[in-house]
Image: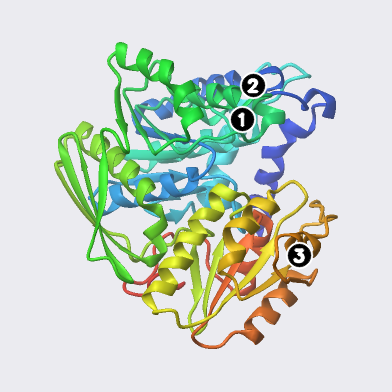
Amino acid sequence: MTQIAEQVTEIIRWIFSSYSRVPRERRQGFDRDVRHPEWTRRLLDAMGRPDERVYNVTVTGSKGKGSHAILTAAMLQQMGVRVGLFTSPHLIDFLERIRLQGMPIPEEDFVRVGELVREAASALPVPADQYIGPVGLVAVMAARWYEEQGVEAAVYELGRGARHDDVNQVVHRGAIVAPIFGEHLDRLGPTWEDVVIAKMGILTEHTAWAALSGQPPLSRKVMAPFLTAFRAKGGEVLEVGNDVEWSWEDLDAEGHVKVRGPGFTAEIRVDERLVPYADNLAASAAAAHRVLRDLGRPSREIAVDLRGLALIGRLQRVRREPDVVIDGAIHALSAAYVRRFAETWRAAREGRGRVHLVLSLPDDKDADGVMRELAPLADRILFTETTNSALHFTRDLVALAATLGYAASHEANPHDAIRAALAEASRDDLVLLVGTQSFVGDALRHFDVPTGPIWTRAGEDGAPC
């Protein structure tokens, strides 16, 4: 290991040390009881409030936080903005979490800024039974680096919540809300309503506008009073399906999404990978419009080409002939994106080609929901596991598939499962590798996919550089 690699490893070890020093029982329970994001705010203050000198946008939700963040940052970059992108977790390389113009932070900068943040954090009087959240430490590093690098706008993906989320302590003018449903009930709950309330904490005293993707009815009902109060204080709400509309133009294997909202239109060129993300694209376009407007840039007509954008681990094509696509769907809602992609893929090929489905769904994931969405499209189903020994695969998913009327098989090793699917596939087929984030990482490693840049070579439709 090189010296700089050792230094990166040491900074990463330190990032998690604040969390691990606290007894396990003090870290378990609802976020509102055990998390103390105020320490992230105090650390930002101690660092000179670097977040206040960049135009920041934060993203919350249950499905699509990462894609909304990447899409918004990509649109801003194509419109000439120097933009930072903060996402979590990483898939392969920790440095993926902090990006500028789509590229990860250099190792040298990661170490240098990490040492600055460590020095400031060590001076804070954090009680022995509290901790600075690891993601909060990384967010402070990102804020400091973005200020140094002259970033004009930065997009931050929040964690599972918002109200008690460390990254939400970053002062942000804009908020993006992806669809919210009843998830993480053991941390944000115990009810679906509690989850929505936690995530609506994204609307802080500094937030001037919010862009919303379409929401489930229950979530929208719980959101209503928060949005009413936000508007009463002068906040602007841009809601897809209400204030913002989208339509397809010239859609085949690729086409244009036309977005119309208050004071702007956006024409977004996409390929079939982004077809399921129409709502996400519309919300991101609305967010990009507000950022551009507030930065004094032309914002009434947005025109971008996202065919070279890699939504890493999200409907990411990593090979052709056969087409191999990776996605992190772990429940019915996220699997619906994969289903819509597969339907578009088949329609574009007039029914030619088979679909091979490889699923990696640990015990805590919605195997039943994923199966109901994707099994009807599959000609072959293969269950696998991951190289992450911390995950548990004790359910008989082959039997579950049988109860739903589908034949399936099992291969524990993910790399052997991928090789088996490829051996069965012809050049005209589609191989879908779907499941938990650890499996996504395994699949990306299997094909040696670079996870650093979010942009690929133009015209390759998402194939890695």
Quarter of the image holding residue 190? top right
> Tag on residue 119?
1
Secondary structure at badge 3 equals: helix
Residue 196 point in image, percent of width and height: 53, 26
Q: Residues within 10 Å of mark 2 (few under 14, many from 20)?
A: few
State the quadrant of the N terminus.
bottom right
Report the Cα–Cα distance between label 3 and label 2: 58 Å
Identify whether 328 is placed above or below 127: below
> Tag on residue 90?
none
Q: Is residue 420 in view?
A: yes
Q: Are dots 3 and 2 in contact, CB under 8 Å?
A: no
Q: Nearer the viewer, residue 47 or 221?
A: 221
Residue 369 point in image, percent of width and height: 64, 51
Look at mark 3 in the image and give the residue it sits on.
402
> Tag on residue 123?
2
Residue 282 point in image, percent of width and height: 31, 45
Q: Residue at x 67, y 45 (%)?
A: 12
Mark 3 or mark 1: name the one nearer the start of the chain. 1
Quarter of the image holding residue 127? top right
Report the Cα–Cα distance between label 2 and label 1: 7 Å
Identify whether 213 is placed above or below 454: above
Q: Residue at x 68, y 16 (%)?
A: 125
Q: Nearer the viewer, residue 229 or 337?
A: 337
Amino acid identity at mark 2: Ala
Q: Is residue 150 in view?
A: no
Q: Nearer the viewer, residue 339 or 158?
A: 339
Q: Are dots 2 and 1 in contact, CB under 8 Å?
A: yes
- Tell me if 280 is positioned left or right of 295 in this view: right
Quarter of the image holding residue 380? bottom right
